[in-house]
Amino acid sequence: TYIELNKFNSLLGNIFIFDLEYVGTSSNLKDCFIWDIGITHLCSNAVFEVSIIPDISPIPPPFSEDFVQVTHELLQSRKAGTFQNAWVQLNQFINTVKLVSSGPTIFMAHNCFKSDKLMLEIDCGRHKIRMPYSWYFFDTLIYCRKMILKQPSYTLNDIHKFMFNKEIQNHHFAISDAIALKNILLSLDINMLEGPIYPSY
């Protein structure tokens, strides 16, 4: 579905910005496991954060030195639990915070179509969880390329540096990146939002 300019206004109350952090033995998402989820509601200051004990042992090293070294100590300090428990908490947050009860819920992430959406589907599949068909996904990477022209890099942190002259604090923790993306979108003017959205699966 393509959401045209100004049509997002009727859906703003059901838009959530999210980020996933995951570990894996390769860059193939089927070899990866979510360990951190961060979500913020576009129209309010509501945030949700949960850490997950990834279903892989030993925990693989980070993909590069830019990413967080996930250890059992880190997970314990963040009170990490099972994916199933995180899923229940996530749904409670969404259903409590969204403002339009009957409309679709839209989740926005940076590089969503090649990363976050697929990773969420994969990990839900592992745990026999079916994502709601009323959930739709929007990729802010595509939107930022349209709104901010001729950038040498469109990574989340580089766009943040370009717009705010500083790097994302606590980059690669999910809630920090989700809030940073929300600030970028608000600065670009949410009334200019348009682009394709895809449903679950």
Image (spheres, rainbow, N blue to C red):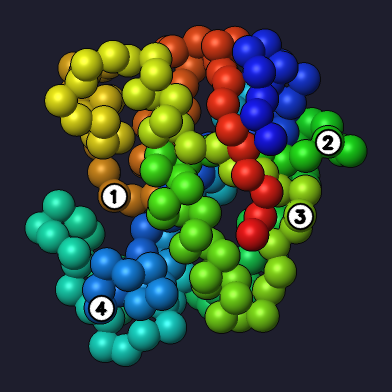
Q: Earlier in the sequence, mark 3 or mark 2?
A: 2
Q: How crowded is mark 2: few (under 14 residues within 10 Å), some or many (20 or more)?
A: some
Horizontal relation, residue 137 to residue 156: left or right = right
Seen at 44% across and 25% down, the residue is: 143
The residue labelled by disc 4 is 25
Relative depth, front residue between 41 and 162: 162
Q: How far apart are marks 1 and 4 (CA)?
A: 18 Å
Which of marks 4 and 1 precedes in the sequence? Answer: 4
Q: Distance between the residues labelled 1 and 2?
A: 31 Å
Secondary structure at numbered mark 2? loop
Q: Mark 3 points at which residue?
A: 133
Please name the amino acid that badge 3 sits on: Tyr
What amino acid type is highlighted by mark number 1? Answer: His
In this view, which residue lies farthest toward the front?
Answer: 1
**Residue 184 % position (x, y):** 40, 22
Residue corresponding to mark 2 = 103
On the image, the x and y values in percent for residue 140 come to 45, 32
Amino acid carrying label 2: it is Gly
Choose top left, top right, bottom left or bottom right for residue 21. bottom left
Q: In which quarter of the image is the N terminus?
A: top right
Residue underneath mark 1? 172
**Residue type highlighted by circle 4:** Thr
Would residue 93 be seen by someone viewing this image from the given angle? no
Query: Which residue shows up at 30% across the image and 35% down it?
Result: 156
In the displayed structure, would residue 50 be above or below residue 170?
A: below
